[in-house]
Image: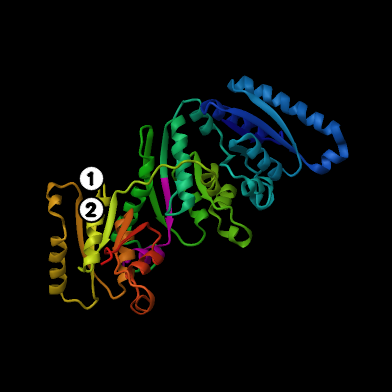
Amino acid sequence: MNIACTTNFSDASRRACDTAALLARRMDASLLVVHALPGNVARTFGERAREAVQGALQEEARRLETLSGVSVEPVVLTGEAEKTLSALVTERDLKLVVSAAPREETPFLGLGGTVDRMAQALTVPFLVVRESEALEAWARGERPLRVMVGLDRSRPYEVARDWVKALSHFGPLEVVGGRIFWVSEEAKRLGLVHPRSYKDVSLDLREALEREADSLLEPLRMPGVTVRARLEPGLGRVADHLVALAEEEHVDVLVVGTHHRKALARLWSVSQHARRLASMSVVSVPVLTAEQGAVKEPPRVRAVLATTDFTEPGDRAVAYAFALTPPGGTVHLLHVEPADASPEAVQAAHRQLELRVPESEQEGQHKVELSVLKGDDVAGVITQAAERYCVDLLCLGTHGRTGVSRAVLGSVAQQVMARSDRPAVTVRMPRA
């Protein structure tokens, strides 16, 4: 495995190279120490400039080899740093790039500078080093590394979490999942009562978000890793709140996923602003990293939601839910009554749900939760329930209507799949 560290021969770059060398030793990797010689400098001073940079890099490589005992290769690039380094990532199959943070006096904290441009161009995780002592202590095996990963239900979170999981193979970690949430938005998503202010977090909302956070962090629960969540309401730019939360938790490294947003969308980029504003080291993990052929672990199904309207397709969806849920998992059975349904109707529906639990479940292979909810927007009620229960899969019965009947009558299953980003299985009746 190869990792690289960029240097401009400043004191900050020297400390970042020290960190990279110790990390390379911890990860059993080779290190490339890299300097990009600007094209105009190369054209003006010619081979003399390149020889001077090569000599300085060779001296730095020898120093780092003495410090860490790893193999260090000096590499001189010519041209714009982000473009030449991006090409080097592909050419040498680099797995991590390390850089010093911009100086504090840099205008706009480095916005649009070399580090910012590299972060936008690189397709591998990018570590911007600040306060390197903690990373170096972990690399030497002296203590666990305290890591915060930006937590939410998104693809960037998944790639950041997977990178932290891979990092845990090299040493102990104390992981905090930091979740900044907009209260009204989450209450709406979960089908809960809307709060009066952005700081008004009800007990139901807090418990639902904690369940979701626990599920999202589950893949990190492994030997050598302690995991917990920290959930805080916020308003405005998420990055500002996340950085403040990381500082409160005294973490050594903040890890965030990134979509490599362009133009105005970057105003809300969590990774970009975290790199600029954080007082600790920051790793940004591009979503593209996970889409370049790495084999992912298959998803685990622990909770399944089946909905039934007590017709044959709905009941068939219930049967499939039990079949698809592994032993020890949870099956949520849900029926939706009209908003004006009487208490007697709700109670009768609950009894009908009880009758749909297979006799084999008397042995207790699954945990079974029965729910009868009310609402005229059936698809909305189902979608919100799936979020509250934090299910891994939905099973939905469908009558298989097509053409005009589908357009006029609609399809609850179709509406649920359009509104929810959770995986869903639709169950049809066999052809007559």
Q: Residues within 10 Å of mark 2 (few under 14, many from 20)?
A: many
User: Circle 2 sits in a helix, a strand or a loop, which is it?
Assistant: helix
The residue that appears at 43% across and 49% down in the rendered structure is 178
Q: Which mark is residue 327?
A: 1
Q: Amino acid at mark 2?
A: Phe
Between the C-alphas of marks 1 and 2, the distance is: 9 Å
- Asked which quadrant contains residue 261, the reply is bottom right
The residue that appears at 34% across and 61% down in the rendered structure is 201
Q: Is residue 2 above or below residue 362?
A: above
For disc 2, the marked residue is 322
Looking at the picture, how far across and down is residue 229, in whole percent?
Answer: 37, 47
Give, as a single range, the part of the protein colored magenta.
177-193
Quadrant for the C terminus in the image:
bottom left
Residue 250 visible in the current orientation: no
Looking at the picture, how far across and down is residue 4, in whole percent?
Answer: 63, 34
User: Circle 1 sits in a helix, a strand or a loop, which is it?
Assistant: loop
The residue that appears at 16% across and 68% down in the rendered structure is 349
